[in-house]
Image: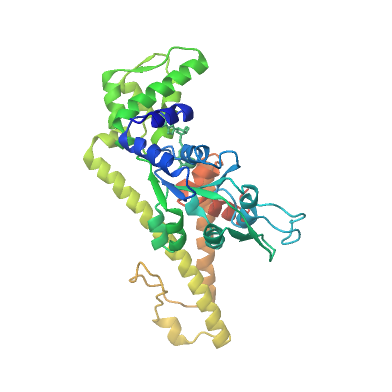
Amino acid sequence: MKADIQQIKQRFGIIGNHVGLNRAIDVALQVAPTDLSVLITGESGVGKEVFPQIIHQNSARKHGQYIAVNCGAIPEGTIDSELFGHEKGSFTGALADRKGYFEVADGGTIFLDEAGELPLPTQARLLRVLETGEFIKVGSSKVQKTNVRIVAATNVNLVQAVADGKFREDLYYRLNTVPIQIPPLRDRAEDILLLFRKFAADCAEKYRMPAVRLDDDARQLLLSYRWPGNIRELKNVTERISVIEESREITADILRIYLPNVSVEKYPVLVKKEEEQKSFANEREILYHILFDMRKDVNDLKKLVHDIMGGNIPVEMQKNETYAPTIHPVQTIQMPVVQKAETVEEESMSLEEVEKDMIRKALERHNGKRKKAAADLKISERTLYRKIKEYNLE
Ligand SMILES: Nc1ncnc2c1ncn2[C@@H]1O[C@H](COP(=O)(O)OP(=O)(O)OP(=O)(O)O)[C@@H](O)[C@H]1O
Ligand SMILES: [Mg+2]
């Protein structure tokens, strides 16, 4: 292994020797001195966050500002102002001029974390600043210049987001000039035990007690687990075992208690079931979206009919007409017969209630933790914030 890769690991506290990890560090070092945009991809918890710092610290910009922005956590209404600044009076509450991150980080690096969550209008502004170095504050007409290096990260599949129309293709290519992929922990068998030992040792030092150790069976179990939450999950499990278990010798039976669904992992048939469940969750999500699209279509239609008929819907339409809204993925779904305007109103109301209820329950399940509730609902944190506000669920 190259000496500089080893140095980087020491300096940034990176544990592991997997070739994919080494390659990722190597690419980060190669690209650091350039101004090229870098896109870091990998599942949640694989360790993406340290990479933009490696890049910044090994670039000529290292004395400039480094700003990390979590694009998923900033409400859609304020993200443009946060990134690009605003002028006094440009919206209610804009009491003074404000500099955005792109102005503050002039000569430095901006890390756009969860870049897949950027709203489309912000994506347009971002593309412009990436291509020309130009941006305009919210509420201003003056074009400003900045010189910022962008490193972005995402744990969602941006290619899919492009296909779904949620992410601009041109921006994707612009950000993805140099891709760095961080492999999932389950593919890094040799790193799993190293990381366990490291986290156990850290814990031992912190709480002044001997470190926990795994017996052979426990070690096998640790290696065969899928680690859906990757290193974040392994760290969490190790810390919990270290603190909760009295014995310092951890057996497979003890370890099993800390690994969710571990029995599922052992039997291939059941694993398939888990995957089916996943796709079911996706289907449910798709159906959910379809229902929302339908509600909008139905309301539009209702309004149209009202406008045309002056509120009197003809008998023919009440009888057999089925209405297939323009839903792209599922062409065969048909709406129930449009009968009276009031029925439609009732249906759309109840859907809202369902949504409200789902959100309330998810928040309860996760003790009000929005990030977790959002993940559970398979919506972005931002959407959840908006819905909470909309339904007054605070
Ligand atoms: N190679 C590693 N060595 C030691 N600790 C690591 C390593 N990789 C990740 N970690 C630790 O694991 C945790 C999760 O890493 P990180 O926050 O970088 O995940 P992420 O890829 O950004 O995930 P997400 O997409 O959910 O934001 C952090 O506490 C980090 O310090
Ligand atoms: Mg992260």
Q: Residue 93, image x and y in percent?
A: 74, 56
Q: Nearer the viewer, residue 349 or 101?
A: 101
Q: Is residue 60 visible?
A: yes
Q: Residue at the spot x=50%, y=53% of the render?
A: 117
Q: Nearer the viewer, residue 81 or 288?
A: 81
Q: Nearer the viewer, residue 291 or 126?
A: 126
Where 311 sits versus 87, above or below? below
Q: Residue 23, image x and y in percent?
A: 35, 38
Q: Nearer the viewer, residue 310 or 197?
A: 197
Where 232 sits versus 383, above or below? above
Q: Residue at the spot x=54%, y=63% of the render?
A: 124
Q: Name the quarter where the N terminus is drawn.
A: top left
Residue 302 in the figure: left or right of residue 22: right
Residue 10 image-quadrant placement? top left
Q: Residue 385, image x and y in percent?
A: 58, 51
Where 61 sits versus 37, above or below? above
Residue 273 in the figure: left or right of residue 37: left
